[in-house]
């Protein structure tokens, strides 16, 4: 009887661990996709700041990512890193505001801040025992 209880407890613990890892994996997939897309868009607008229509399309995309990241469920295992993801995405959004407004200095500042926050996000994940997957 004790053996059966031990096996049941072990199986339950394994399932709980696997669920936690899967949930963190889902979060990491979403975060990686948001970061990669934001980075590609930022690289695109750096050389096309005169294309207002393009800037408006990218602006809508950055706003959607910020909104999604604010609402998404964050697993407890990586909750300490999530504010840095938000800061990356918010700085991409601010960079678009600067580009639309023709403020090249502010654009560069926001992109530099986004890059620094992304490094902090990844370092925090590493400290927690996670890394972003390739997307």
Image (tube, helix red, strand yellow):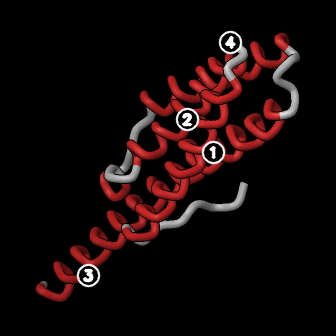
Earlier-in-chain disc, 3 versus 1: 3
Earlier-in-chain disc, 2 versus 1: 1
Element on which disc 3 rests: helix
Q: Is residue 126 left or right of residue 60?
A: left
Can you see residue 65? yes
Gap between marks 2 and 4 measured at Cα: 19 Å
Residue depicted at 35% across the width and 73% down the height: 14
Mark 4 vs mark 1: give the one in front. Answer: 4
Residue depicted at 72% across the width and 40% down the height: 37
Gap between marks 2 and 1 measured at Cα: 7 Å
Earlier-in-chain disc, 4 versus 1: 1
- Mark number displayed over residue 89: 2
Q: Nearer the viewer, residue 129 or 11?
A: 129
- Residue that badge 1 annotates: 35
Gap between marks 3 and 2 measured at Cα: 45 Å
Earlier-in-chain disc, 2 versus 4: 2
Q: Is residue 22 left or right of residue 12?
A: right
Mark 2 vs mark 4: give the one in front. Answer: 4
- Mark number displayed over residue 101: 4
Give how far across and how far down residue 99 sits, in percent.
71, 21
Estimate how packed mark 2 is, as few (under 14), some (14 to 19) or many (20 or more) residues with alpha carbons within 10 Å: many
In which quadrant is the C terminus drawn? bottom right
- Residue that badge 3 annotates: 7
- Mark number displayed over residue 11: none
Element on which disc 1 rests: helix
Element on which disc 2 rests: helix
Mark 3 vs mark 2: give the one in front. Answer: 2
Residue depicted at 63% across the width and 18% down the height: 97
Residue found farthest to the front: 105
């Amino acid at each position: 009887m004790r053996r059966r209880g031990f096996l049941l407890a072990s199986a339950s613990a394994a399932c709980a661990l696997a669920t936690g890892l899967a949930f963190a994996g889902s979060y990491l997939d979403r975060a990686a996709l948001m970061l990669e897309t934001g980075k590609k868009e930022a690289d695109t607008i750096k050389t096309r700041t005169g294309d207002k229509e393009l800037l408006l399309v990218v602006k809508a995309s950055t706003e959607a990512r910020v909104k999604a990241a604010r609402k998404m469920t964050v697993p407890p295992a990586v909750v300490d890193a999530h504010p840095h993801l938000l800061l990356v995405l918010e700085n991409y959004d601010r960079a678009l505001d600067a580009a639309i407004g023709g403020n090249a200095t502010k654009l560069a500042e926001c992109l530099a801040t986004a890059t620094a926050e992304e490094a902090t996000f990844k370092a925090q994940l590493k400290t927690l025992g996670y890394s972003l997957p390739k997307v």
